[in-house]
Image (cartoon, rainbow, N blue to C red):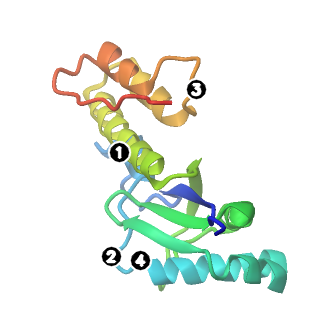
């Protein structure tokens, strides 16, 4: 029996259009671009938009390659994050299509950028990364609103995780002085 091998993509939606009047308010810059998505955004609409973009870029061949294996496993409107499952041999087609998409697939959708944050062979690692990023996002937003000069949480959020450096949880524990922070261990 042949085992089907998939890749899971963790994708963030970053909104590029800042609503008028919010650019000079008490809201953190980090929060301006990481706003919640509309409740109208559904997994079916997202799949349809991705399939349409793959067809526009790669034609019938690309569209047929991803047709059966593309699936939205998780969508959070609150964090503007979703997880896609795609076959291992075709995940780059979907990644390219996401890079070319420039609006949310709803009626009068806002302009945005789709950022692929993590690609993994297991959904568990992608979920752990989503939780880690959500915690660091909250810490960075709190830090920016309090006016602290250190940007350790923001650096850990924006830089890719590297095994040779400190893990993001150790940055959050040491530099941000969080007593109740519940870090995720890096198992490899």
Residue extending farthest to the front is: 1
Instruction: Please tell me how crowded label 4 is: few (under 14), some (14-19), or many (20+) other residues with Cα within 10 Å.
Output: some
| Image depth: mark 2 or mark 1 in front | 1
User: Dot 2 lies on which element?
Assistant: loop
Q: Can residue 23 be seen in this snapshot?
A: no
Q: Tell me which numbered mark, 2 or 1, is placed earlier along the sequence.
A: 2
Q: Could you tell me if the residues under marks 2 and 1 are in contact, i.e. CB atoms within 8 Å?
A: no
Q: What residue is pinned by disc 2?
A: 39
28 sits to left or right of 110: left
Asked whether the viewer can see residue 133, the reply is yes
Q: Earlier in the sequence, mark 1 or mark 3?
A: 1
Return the mark for residue 131: 1
Which residue is disc 4 drawn over? 41
Write the residue at 67% across / 83% down.
52
Helix, strand or loop at mark 3: loop
Q: Are marks 3 and 4 in contact (CB under 8 Å)?
A: no
């Amino acid at each position: 029996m042949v085992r089907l091998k998939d890749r899971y993509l963790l994708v963030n939606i970053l909104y590029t259009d800042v609503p008028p009047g919010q650019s000079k308010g008490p809201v953190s810059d980090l929060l301006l671009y990481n706003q919640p998505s509309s409740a109208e955004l559904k997994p079916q609409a997202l799949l349809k938009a991705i399939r349409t973009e793959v067809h526009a870029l790669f034609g019938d061949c690309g569209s047929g390659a991803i047709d059966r294996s593309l699936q939205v496993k998780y969508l959070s409107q609150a964090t503007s994050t979703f997880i896609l499952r795609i076959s291992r041999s075709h995940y780059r087609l979907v990644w390219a299509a996401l890079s070319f998409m420039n609006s949310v697939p709803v009626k009068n959708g806002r302009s945005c950028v789709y950022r692929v944050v993590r690609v993994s062979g297991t959904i568990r690692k992608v979920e752990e990364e989503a939780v880690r990023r959500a915690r660091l996002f909250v810490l960075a937003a709190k830090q920016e609103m309090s006016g602290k000069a250190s940007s350790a949480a923001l650096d850990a959020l924006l830089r890719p995780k590297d095994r040779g450096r400190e893990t993001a949880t150790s940055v959050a524990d040491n530099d941000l002085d969080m007593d109740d922070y519940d870090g995720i261990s890096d198992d490899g």
